[in-house]
Amino acid sequence: MRLRTSVLAGALVAATICVSALPAAAQDSIYVPLFTYRTGPFSGSGIFIAEGMHDYLEMLNQRDGGIGGVKLAIEECETGYDTKKGLECYEAVKDKKPVMVNPWSTGITLPLIPRAAVDKIPVLSMAYGLSAAAIGDTFPWIFNPPATYWDGLSMILSYIGNKEGGLDKLKGKTIGYIYLDAGFGKEPIPLFEQFAKDYGFTLKLYPVAATEMQNQSSQWLNVRRDRPNYMVMYGWGALNPTAIKEAVKINYPMDKFVSIWWPSEDDAKSAGDGAKGFKELNWHAVGANFPAIQDIKKYVTDKNLTQTDKNHLGQVLYNRGVYNSMLIAEAIRNAQKITGKKVVTGEDVRRGLETLDVDKARLKEIGLDGFTDPVKLTCADHNGHFPAFMQEWDGTKWVKVSEPIKPDMAKVGPLLSAAAKEYVEKNTGWPKRTEACDKAS
Amino acid sequence: MLYREAGQFKTSYVADQAIFPIRQDRIGLALILLIAFVVLPLTASDFFLSVVMVPLLIFSLAAIGLNILTGYTGLLSLGTGGFMGVGAFACYKLTSIFPEVNIVIWILVSGLFASGVGILFGLPSLRIKGFYLAVATLSAQFFLDWAFVRLPWLVNYNISGAIEVPTRTLFGIPVTGPNATPQVRYLVILGVVTLLTWFASNLVHGRIGRSWMAVRDMDLAAELMGIRLYRTKLLAFAVSSYFCGVAGALMVFLWYGSAEPGVFGIDQSFFILFMVIIGGLGSLIGSFFGAGLIYGLPIILRGFVNAVGLEIAPATVEHLTFMTVGALIVFFLIIEPEGLARLWQIAKQKLRVWPFPY
């Protein structure tokens, strides 16, 4: 009995430690949790994102003392791209009143979507997650600027069409689609099939399961047999470098291999010289020659306030992390402006995101002139469907090779509304939007 | 000192054959149930309930399921994740086709579908055992993985290929969906797990459990004694998969709230298998211990690092947790290869004869 009591007591003590491990949110700071994955099979992409996200916010803390004079309490939570751990992170940060969460995984975003409205925590899933979340009237708490996966696909197709001399020239051609066989990769398929019907090309699917990311020989054997005229890739983590290597191995013409915006320098570099000509979409610049990123160098990396490897500054996924944090920071600043409060809450930041307007002048002001196009969100449109451009791997770095490409909203728009409607129908009791719309600030 | 049975005399066979023959055990169990059902929901924080207790109970249930197969019947299986998936998808289909039926009923019914699939993949067990059977059940895992991804009907043609759990209520209180409070979800899971553990306890202590163990210890001898092997083995597969299926349905509906097919992968199967091995093969309480060590310990370690206020980056904590849990598993298996349940048993035995343990 005594042993049992002591075991019980031990368990209770452990539980108390667990519970008390959550420090109460300090009243004079804004709590910004960052869900990151520096471990696991997706760390090859996750590390850069985590570094970029963390460093920009830390730079604001060091240089300006936070946002509007309020320090940011930045805390990382390691998810390992695992839904289980992601939910654990969410529960752990929830009580500390975060102003928003960035799940960085479609798998973690999906269960957070219904919870966001209940817990009053906006979810920023930048260019990933549920595409339909762009419909602000249905999903007032979810934001996915600057473009959805469907936008991305329509941009890739219009780029390919442009290269062939018009979308009608795609008739009779074959386009292969290699993708992560999870929610993320599967989402564009209905639109892809629609395009195939409209333009008369054949679509070949090459799914790669998450457990098979590093072993794609069978998929590429099929690619060699089918000889698609173009290959489109939606990959993440170890899928990207493996696919590029395999494509080089079977001598697939790299200039016909186009990816959505996730492959990094490392992914292309690991395939050697053969990867030259590989293309991907992007919506922001690469390189470290921006005042804001120089400030990161000056205030954060040079002072060793981060774990970032200095060579990572300016790489495509690092800058993606910076872009993500820029959205966080601007949303908080906007929320302060609308509400007049210094320490804002999740509800305020939701309003801040809904009226987010980072124009050219503001980009210049924050030291990111020419880094990216202006972002403007509205109550109804939580995405913006902004154009992206194509960049090409020249063997050592990414080079911009196209003008901005606009998404084909005529095709994507109806699909988005239909998906949002379907989501509401399936989730019986999905709340009607009650959040009032702010006038653009 | 307190844990001694001096003075407790049994006057009937029923008392002698009781699962908890010692009074202190019965009091202890009542205390644990009291804490679990009353104290925790009233006092514990939302974080503790939804991050620690809910997953612990669900994993314990899945571990009991696998333990029935592997621990009690001696049939090695690597398909646990897949069977959990069958339960989850079955529950999703059932509740979307018949939304008016109570979700708890569907959770309990969904296990039957897992049972069916379990029996199907258990058929090879009539001819093969050991590693060969492990490979046969591995094929179940891979086939089910494939089916979850490839059959859009299972997720009602959802484009993201994931289950999105709708809100369902019990007596007007939401138990699934975003509005279900951790307390309600915890209590529903606790109820289901307690009920099924009680059921499993009765099974393994009765005739069926005896025949399972006879098959485990030597199937030839069991057959000579008149135990029908195919019936016993398939029953073990059916019951085991039922438990796993219910655990899977609970996991998606009352914990995750949405799930991609990826969560029912081979990793999940191994995760549960480790729990069974660490906790103790052929022990129900071992299933709870195993779940506690494999799932709970990393969380406690992370909480500990935070509580001490050490300035360690989260990724480093993650690596450290991996190493510590690994080291602890090796340590426990060195001092007791038969698992935590055996340690627990030894401790109790020693206390019963205290102060003269032998």
Image (cartoon, rainbow, N blue to C red):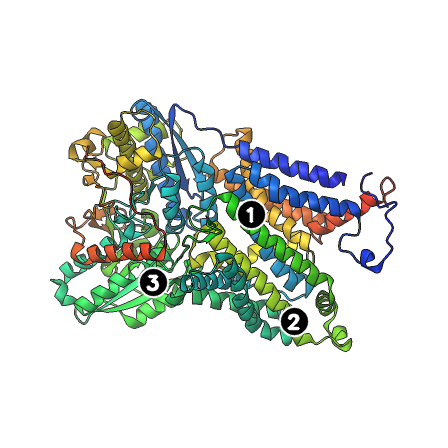
In which quarter of the view is residue A316 placed?
Answer: top left
Query: Is the same chain shared between marks 3 and 1?
Result: no
In the rendered structure, the answer to whether residue B252 lies left or right of residue A355 reads right
Q: Which residue is mark 1?
A: B187
Closer to the eye: label 3 or 1: 1
At mark 2, the secondary structure is helix
Closer to the eye: label 1 or 2: 1
Q: Position of residue A79 (x, y in %)?
A: 45, 44
Question: Chain letter of disc 1?
Answer: B
| Mark 1 closeness class: few <14, some 14–19, many ≥20 residues within 10 Å | some
Residue toward you, B42 or B112:
B42
Q: Which residue is mark 3?
A: A249
Instruction: Please state which amino acid type lies under the numbered disc 3.
Output: Lys
Question: Chain letter of disc 3?
Answer: A
Query: How far, Cα to Cα, is label 3 from label 2?
Result: 49 Å
In the rendered structure, the answer to whether residue A50 lies left or right of residue A366 reads right
Q: Position of residue A252 (x, y in %)?
A: 28, 64
Q: Does the image show residue A260?
A: no
Query: How far, Cα to Cα, is label 3 from label 1?
Result: 55 Å
At mark 1, the secondary structure is helix
Question: Chain letter of disc 2?
Answer: B
Q: Position of residue B186 (x, y in %)?
A: 54, 47
At mark 3, the secondary structure is helix
Instruction: Please state which amino acid type lies under the numbered disc 2.
Output: Lys
Residue toward you, A253 or A165:
A165
Query: How far, Cα to Cα, is label 1 from label 2?
Result: 33 Å
Instruction: Please state which amino acid type lies under the numbered disc 1.
Output: Leu
